Image: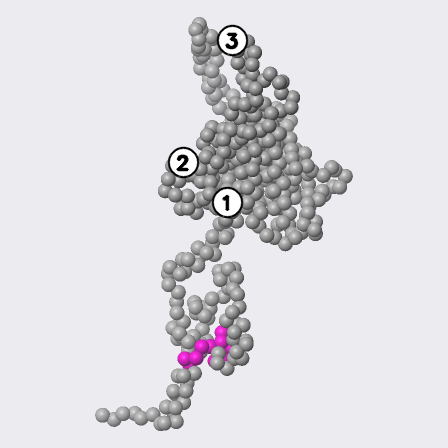
Amino acid sequence: MARCMMPVSLMLSHERRLRLRRLPMCDRCRSPASEMPPQKLRLRSLRPVSPREMCFRDREPHLGSRRSPGSSPALGGAGRRRTMPSLPALLALLFACWAPLRATASSWWSLAMSPVQRPEMFIIGAQPVCSQLPGLSAGQRKLCQLYQEHMAYIGEGARTGIRECQHQFRQRRWNCSTVDDASVFGRVLQIGSRETAFTYAVSAAGVVNAISRACREGELSTCGCSRAARPKDLPRDWLWGGCGDNVDYGYRFAKEFVDAREREKNFAKGSEEQGRVLMNLQNNEAGRRAVYKTADVACKCHGVSGSCSLKTCWLQLAEFRKVGDQLKEKYDSAAAMRITRRGKLELVNSRFKPPTPEDLVYVDPSPDYCLRDESTGSLGTRGRLCNKTSEGLDGCALMCCGRGYNQFKSVRTERCHCKFHWCCFVRCKKCTQVVDQFVCK
């Protein structure tokens, strides 16, 4: 059988081309890497790649989105074979790129709605549970692993703060509404407004409240009853003892946990981001101090037939409603601040007194919250109940932002005609009445 013989010169040139094709190629110049200067090649191979480049830079040499004319799908423009990444590698890459975006929108407030409210979950070990809790920063996750029994009470404190926020703002355009994701409040708290300042403060206060009470009740192994010093104005014949709320421990632990996320951030000095971090730290501190300042001395009488010849006293936290009322007053008098080039917050209006550590501060003006706005997270006031006869913030004129309101009738059932019977109970009847209600258009 006849065979087609290749000339020797063509065979040599063909082998040379094959050897040349096997050499590693420079991505930019498409020339053999062996022809590059050693110094330039070394610098190129050691160039650091940031995580953002790993996620978003052009990956054309791997994915082959653009080919030179005449090249096959499996080969590069210079004859180099392109390997498609495996499916697990692609999924890992997508998760790595998406995780930072999710983390920026989440918050430790999501503990109020997570299964950490069931302490028995920690029987399987702290590491798996803490790594699965949404919204925790790296430092908060470490604290979770060290103090796993505290996490249920941190969630309880967050839940207490959210409830108090909704109570204090129930008659305002923004009523502290929550959304069904890890951010809890949505985009509205991405603005450094008065409302954001109050939310940070009342949440930090809730953690101090919950941890302090858990210490007194013996639920935590790292703390116990309060060791606060005896007040100087307490009468000498009264005993200072009992088991008080451990406000000191609650304050210190809440400071470590809540502030951990803010202290981990590293922004340029004088930037808006640094101003927001300083604002959050100030408001966290104001919330913690509100719990500390409202704590008071409680006493119990001892003696025959209630003669109260002897009293035992201890330190006791105030009802959280009192804390919320105080923070609401601080909200009404919050100070407008701005960041300086030196990385400090200063008053926008220098004629006012500088804020103390117990005051709230904000760096952005509040939206009007009248209309639904996805960019700010405002839900608007459409469909909100309003008071037709009120001239305050809950009145239809202000609540509805001038859009008017609709009227409808509803049936309400109430207890009525209650009588006391000996001994010892109260019996009431149920009465129904039709009432007029008004909702914003």
x 69%, y 38%: residue: 355
Residue 374 image position (x, y, % from top left): 54, 45
Front residue (pair 434, 101): 101
Residue that extends furthest to the front in the rendered view of this protein: 236
Mark 2 vs mark 1, CA separation in Å = 19 Å
Q: Earlier in the sequence, mark 2 or mark 3?
A: 2
Residue segment shown in magenta:
21-32
User: Answer yes or no: do the residues labelled 1 and 3 have beta carbons within 8 Å?
Assistant: no
Give SS at disc 1. helix
Residue 304: give its label.
Answer: 3
Task: Give the foreground label among 2 and 3.
Answer: 3
- Which residue lies at the image location 43% right of the left edge and 36% below the top edge? 117
182 or 259, nearer to the observer = 259
Residue 379 in view (yes/no): no
Above-or-below relation of 239 to 84: above
**Magenta segment: does it hold 49?**
no
Badge 3 marks a residue whose secondary structure is: helix
Residue at the disc numbered 2: 118
* Residue 309 seen in the current view: yes
